[in-house]
Image (spheres, helix red, strand yellow):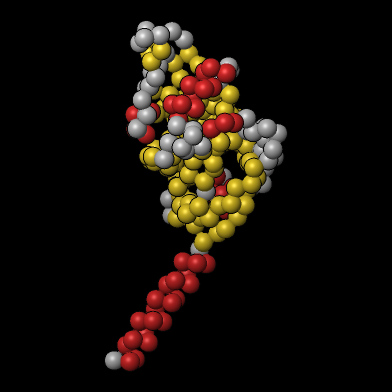
Amino acid sequence: MRAITYLIIFVLSSTFAQIVQGQHNKTIVISPKSELNIIGSSNVNDFQCLFGFNNKRQTLPVSFKEATNGIIFNKATLSLKNTSFDCGGRAINRDFHSLLKTDQHPQIYLTLKKLTKKPQSKNLVEALVEIQIAGKSKNYVLNAKVNQKDELHILGNLKLNIKDFGLEAPKKMMGLIVVSEQIEINFNLIVEQKTSHITKFLK
């Protein structure tokens, strides 16, 4: 009986060691030249809120492992301060923060969970992303385009409904101006410090 117990412990220990060895921990650098914006609309006009990277590089620790059909991330979260978005005016900025409940939830979190290479093109990937807004999270699958030069460019867009996060579109002028529940997030993230594992996967 004791021999069987030792055998089980040995097998479990070996399996755990293999899992740990397959895990990669890296730090990537997001260039201040990156772009990210949120686009919305109302029955009167459209609006755009730009995220300001403020000429500062953002370091992002990532933890991932390679799989047969892609890369699985255990840690890869980009946090965006709500106050770093500029919608073009003080009043609309105030409405933006009110909509996102900035006083209670000051940040938006974008978490990359998985990358899957698209077979039809070496520049296209399918990304599983978790987005947290106002304390509520939801998973989305989006297509992204990756360009590799001296830097790694990740471009894409995502359309979502703010009701998915328990948010209510504001109304102005006694209901005459109604903001759409649909918004769009566009991004062009530039990674200065690439990891060989991710670069190899994208080739």
Residue 203: where, in percent of width, then height? 56, 45
Q: Position of residue 162 (x, y in %)?
A: 38, 28
Q: Is residue 57 above or below residue 74?
A: above
Q: Is residue 125 above or below residue 97?
A: below
Q: Residue furthest bottom?
A: 2
Q: Position of residue 185 (x, y in %)?
A: 48, 28
- The residue located at (49%, 33%) in the rendering is 102
Q: Does residue 6 sit above or below 80 in this rendering?
A: below
Instruction: Depth check: give the residue in front, 8 or 148.
Output: 8
Residue 51: name its quadrant. Answer: top right
- Residue at 54 percent of width and 42 percent of height: 78
Residue 141 place in picture, x, y as percent: 40, 38
Quadrant in the picture for residue 32: top right
Q: Which residue shows up at 44% across the image and 76% down it?
A: 14
Q: Quadrant of the N terminus?
A: bottom left
Q: Is residue 123 visible?
A: no
Question: Vertically, is 180 above or below 136?
Answer: above
Q: Is residue 30 visible?
A: yes
Q: Is residue 141 left or right of residue 123?
A: left
How many numbered marks does the figure carry?
0
Q: Answer with the quarter of the image where residue 192 lies.
A: top right
Q: Residue furthest left?
A: 1
